[in-house]
Amino acid sequence: MGLFNRKGYDATSIGDLAAELGVTKSAIYHHFASKEDLLRLALDDALDELTMVVTAAAGDTDGTGAYERLRGVVRRSVEVLAAHQPAVTLLLRVRGNTPVETEALKRRRWLDDQLAGLVRAAIAEGALRDDLSPDLVSRLLFGMVNSLVEWYRPEGTHDPVSVADAVTSIAFDGLSRRDHHPGAR
């Protein structure tokens, strides 16, 4: 995944991968039929856990409200990204140039749709404002989480839990102080 992220999937050859891994091309072909199989494996790594998180929240029947489930999805999305950052980075760079990429993009759209459904349900509960499009809110929430691939580093100053806390707090509680009133001096 690292080489795909550095060079780009299309620009990376099996020979490049073999050199990076210190093995022969035939060793790679012994385990994988094609470079596209490696891409599928990496994209599944990025999508499978997130799909489980979103599916569980969308289908939750234990009485937890949609608002709390939505907050949980955002929090868990940060944790999934932190745990699978190279694969998520690759996922965010696919453009649909191959059948594997097209399928990954379909899965991403499905995730957006599920999250938008949770936003709609939270609006219906009265927990979220109703003047913003649920589809837009979904994209903005995932966009905030996905932006972490650009700057988050596991060895940096912020651990995944504190980042998840911050993203969830900003997304659902905002940035303004509770005692601050616009226009007041």
Image (cartoon, grey):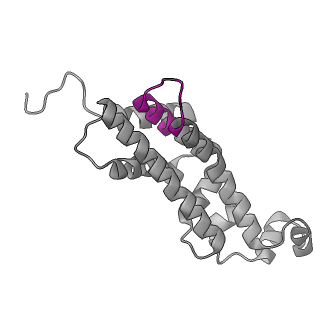
Query: Dividing the picture into quarters, in which one does residue 7 lie?
Result: bottom right
- Magenta span contains residue 72: yes
Image point (63%, 64%), residue name: 5
Q: In the visual, does 110 lie left or right of 155? A: left
Image point (59%, 60%), residue name: 91
Return the residue nearer the eye: 76 or 121: 121
Query: Is the residue 52 above or below the residue 21 in the image?
Result: above
Image coordinates of residue 146 in percent, x first then y, are: 49, 51
Query: Is the residue 20 above or below the residue 121 in the image?
Result: below
Return the residue nearer the eye: 59 or 22: 59
Image point (55%, 65%), residue name: 93
User: What is the quadrant of the N terminus in the image?
Assistant: bottom right
User: What is the quadrant of the C terminus in the image?
Assistant: top left
Q: Residue furthest front?
A: 61
Image coordinates of residue 90 in percent, x first then y, are: 61, 61
| Stretch of the chain drawn in magenta | 58-74
